[in-house]
Amino acid sequence: AAELTALCGQRVGEEYESREPANVQGLESIADCLVSIEYLLHELAAGRKSDGAMKQLIGENLAALRA
């Protein structure tokens, strides 16, 4: 989850600093990751541990950001 958060922040910075037109697909991937991070935080706050589904969600989001 920490890697996902860091990569999300990096991508936001890249989009903000870019002089190119907005990469809509990239922005949507960032938004999806932020929603996933929010979900993970709610699960952790509720006392639930990271399970296979959460790890899969993190992996899918990382793959989308790296694409």
Image: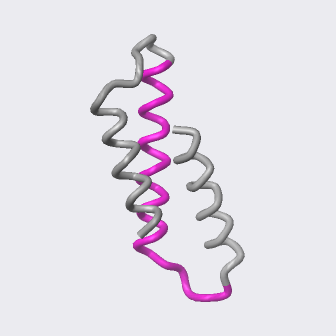
Q: Is residue 60 left or right of residue 29?
A: left
Residue visible at 56% across and 55% down in the picture: 8
Which residue sits at x=42%, y=42%?
36
Asked if residue 21 is among those painted magenta in the image, a careful observer would answer yes
Q: Residue at x 44, y 31 (%)?
A: 40
Toward the viewer: 54 or 34?
54
- Give the vertical position of 23 relative to 26 (above or below): below
Which segment did they paint magenta?
Answer: 19-44
Question: How far across and how far down the image is residue 15, in percent?
Answer: 61, 72
Residue at the spot x=59%, y=64% of the render? Answer: 11
Q: Position of residue 23 (x, y in %)?
A: 49, 78
Q: Is residue 1 above or below residue 22?
A: above
Spot occupied by residue 52 in the image (x, y as percentages of width and height): 29, 30
Q: Quadrant of the C terminus?
A: bottom left
Residue 45 sits above or below residue 20 on the image: above
> Mainly helix, strand or loop, the magenta region?
helix
- In this rendering, position of residue 23 left or right of residue 52: right
Residue 1 inside the magenta-drawn segment: no
Where residue 44 sits: x, y (%)?
A: 47, 20
